[in-house]
Amino acid sequence: MGEFVDKMKGATNEAIGKTKVAVGKSTEHPEMVTKGLAQEAKGKAQSKIGTVKGKLGDRF
């Protein structure tokens, strides 16, 4: 179950991050762009953790 949850959280964070980047660019708000990029990176990491958990069988 941890694999699925991590992947879903990761996908959600990536989507929110991309939205923040787009809004930040369109409103010329560089701080929002930076926060969006960080949230995207967090989402990608969560997705990778989910993949690893899936391969290890949620043992960690």
Image: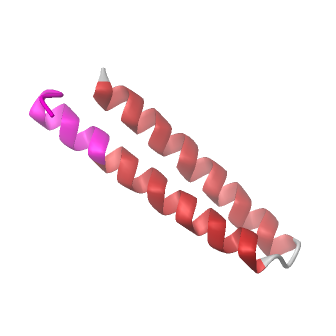
In this rendering, the answer to whether 25 lies above or below 55 is below
Residue 25 lies within the magenta run: no
* Quarter of the figure with residue 45: bottom left
Q: Is residue 47 left or right of residue 35?
A: left
Q: Position of residue 59 (x, y in %)?
A: 12, 29
Measured as percent of width and height from the top left, residue 37 is found at: 58, 68
Residue at the image point whose x is 54% and y is 52% from the top: 14
First to last magenta residue range: 49-60
Residue sitting at the far right: 27
Which residue is located at x 48 percent, y 38 percent?
9
Quadrant in which the C terminus is drawn: top left
Residue 10 appears at what percent x and percent y? 46, 44
Q: In x, y percent, where is residue 43?
A: 47, 51
Does residue 42 appear left or right of residue 60 in this picture?
Answer: right
Considering only vertical position in the picture, is 22 above or below 30? above
Residue at image coords 40%, 28%? 5
What main secondary structure does the magenta stretch of the protein show? helix
State yes or no: residue 52 in magenta: yes
Q: Quadrant of residue 4?
A: top left
From the image, which quarter does the N terminus lie in? top left
Q: Is residue 30 left or right of residue 38?
A: right
Position of residue 34 in the picture relative to residue 56 (left or right): right
